[in-house]
Amino acid sequence: MLRKYRIAIPVEKKDCLFSVLSWLDIRFSYFACFQHHEIAYPYGSFPQKIFAGNFAIGWELLPEYESKSEIIGVLAYDFKNQLERLCSENPSLVDCPEVAFFIPTLKISLEQNAMLIETELNLDFKGLFDGSFFTNPKVDVIAHTDKTKYFEDIYAIRQHIEEGDMYELNYCMSFSFAETSWNPISGYLDLMSISPMPFSGLFKFEDNFLLAASPERFLKKEGLRLLAQPIKGTIKRGKDELEDLALSEKLLASEKERAENLMIVDLMRNDLSKISETGSVMVMELFGVYPFAKVHQMISTVSSRLREGLGFKEIIEATFPMGSMTGAPKIKCMHLIEQYENFKRGWFSGAFGMIHADGDFDFNVVIRSIIFDRAMGKGYFAVGSAITYDADAAYEWEECYLKAAAILDVLEKRS
């Protein structure tokens, strides 16, 4: 039987949550904190929950535990190589396991001014809030793609499109930093203070940490219903209400952004059709524009009814990685991504989330996120955009740095 403890503390305060996560960090090899920050999102978002445990499981063991226990974890982008005849030979900025899942033995629900802890373990909660918030040092961020190389690559990708190799490719560039005293828990809470997102989370897998500030859902399963919500289309927020409205309307009216979004919607419809009942795949919303802390995003929603008897493995094998982070057609784009990008994506553009004990699940797209190896004192992040034939290199460059702004603010102490 689970032991339950209700502790009345202001868990929304940064120093209190820092203490909780630091306490878990000492006692568990794996933990995950999920947050939605009260941000309205179509069809819901991550819960306000924390999970921790010391038992990791591999991909082949997933069916054994599915529908019996919660399973928490990350699939790296490079897991694609186990699904298709692909490779990832570019250098790693941080070495990340392709499959990083664990079974939790402790669950925490974050409530207003309270924390409900459920655990199979006889734990001592004394000293849980004795710590104070740690302030990270400023770090030097290294960009691994300069503007000249970026423009050259965009031109080359456009040539592939002109030759008919593909229609759209998600091209990304990476940034790294090194600091042995950098604290990923503090870094996550700093990032949340300026860029709260509906699919936020902090994930620890031994010495690897994911600090996720993602606005994008990859895939959600509720019963037999599947939901995919690709994002394609980004524009900055306005300085006032009038400018903000004008910018959101500009994004909605952009033929280029709508074309990019539609291509990925069609790709997701195709992926879902492989595992869904015939005729059940439908677009619930096309070109929805939603505001976040620093940007407006264009989000579409695709749903389907899953065929009976299919589990998490079969669903992932048909849909991973998400089309918004590859382009269309998917396989050709992944070959070209390996050719033009200069880093191994690792956890970036993979998926982070949870499988519930009833077999339902919800996973985000790992974007706007930091990956950090505490043992090595090294971290990285990446940003990208969809390149079509009409893409303007200067505009795409600026869009990438807009997406990187919050992370750069945190790392370089710019705000």
Image: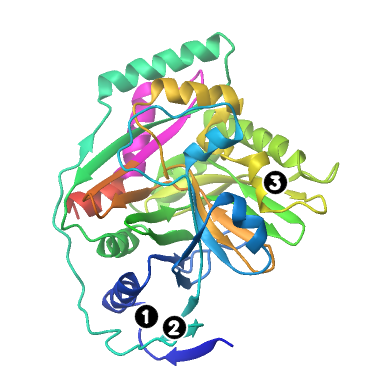
Q: Which numbered marker is on residue 112?
A: 2
Q: Is residue 271 above or below residue 217?
A: above
- Residue at (49% x, 44% y) in the render: 350
- Residue at (43% x, 88% y) in the render: 122
Q: Is residue 319 left or right of residue 379?
A: right
Give coordinates of residue 321: x percent, y percent. Answer: 56, 39
Give coordinates of residue 267: x percent, y percent. Answer: 66, 33
- Circle 2 SS class: loop
Give the extent of the magenta segment: 382-404
Res 323 → quadrant: top right
The Cα atoms of the two marked residues, 2 and 1, are separated by: 7 Å
- Looking at the rendered image, the quarter that the C terminus falls into is bottom left
Give coordinates of residue 52: x percent, y percent. Answer: 44, 71
Q: Mark 2–mark 1 contact, CB under 8 Å?
A: yes
Q: Which numbered marker is on residue 371?
A: none
Q: Which numbered marker is on residue 11?
A: 1
Please state which amino acid type lies under the numbered disc 1. Val
